[in-house]
Image: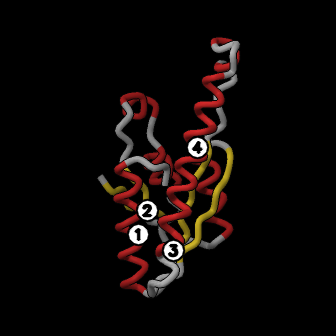
Amino acid sequence: MDGTNSSMRAGAYALGLARRQRCELVAVYVRALPSALIPLADTSGSATTTIMATHDDVERELRLLVAQQVRSDVDVRLVVRHGEPYTELVDVAKQVRADAVIVGQSCRTLHRIAGSLSTKLVRSGRWPVTVVP
C-alpha cells in the first residue's frame, strides 16, 4: 500500500478476502528511497524534505487505518520498509510465508514501458497475485 487510490482499493479487497478466509492480513508500505539525483538538482534540500514528509503522512494514514481494524475480526498488521518496492515486498512475502499478494494497478505511464510492480510479481511466479484496478 502506498496511499494511492488503487493501493487503497487493493487493501480493501485484501481485507475482505482475509475476513472471508479468516486469516491474517499483512499490509506492506515501502518508503521508496529518494533518487540520488535529487540532491544534484535541489541544492536547498527542500525536495528531499517534501518527499520524506509525504512518506510520513502516508505511513501515518496507514497506521490509523490498521488501528481501526483492531476491533474487527481480522488480524491486520502493517510492515513498513525502506527501499525498492518490488524487492521489499518479495522479502516480506517470503518472511511471512504469504499465500497470496494483492496489489493495486499502477497508473504511471513509465510502468507501461518498464514494467510495473504487479507485472514483476506475476512474472516471479512465487505467489498468486491479484491486481486490483
Q: Foreground residue, 5 or 65? A: 65
Q: Foreground residue, 57 or 7? A: 57
Asked which colour scheme the image uses, the reply is: secondary structure
In whole angstroms, how far apart are the C-alphas of marks 3 and 1? 7 Å
Label 4–label 1 contact, CB within 8 A? no
In whole angstroms, how far apart are the C-alphas of marks 2 and 4? 21 Å
Establish if 119 lies above or below 22.
above
Please give the residue where the numbered disc 1 appears in the rendered image.
14
Which mark is first along the chain, 2 or 1? 1
Numbered disc 4: secondary structure: helix
Which mark is first along the chain, 1 or 3? 1
Label 3–label 2 contact, CB within 8 A? no
Label 1–label 2 contact, CB within 8 A? yes
Which mark is first along the chain, 4 or 3? 3
Q: Tell me which residue sits at (37%, 76%) in the image.
A: 17
Establish if 85 lies above or below 22.
above
Numbered disc 3: secondary structure: strand
Q: Nearer the viewer, mark 3 or mark 2?
A: 3
Q: Position of residue 133 (x, y in %)?
A: 29, 52
Residue type of the residue flagged with mark 3: Leu
In whole angstroms, how far apart are the C-alphas of marks 4 and 1? 22 Å
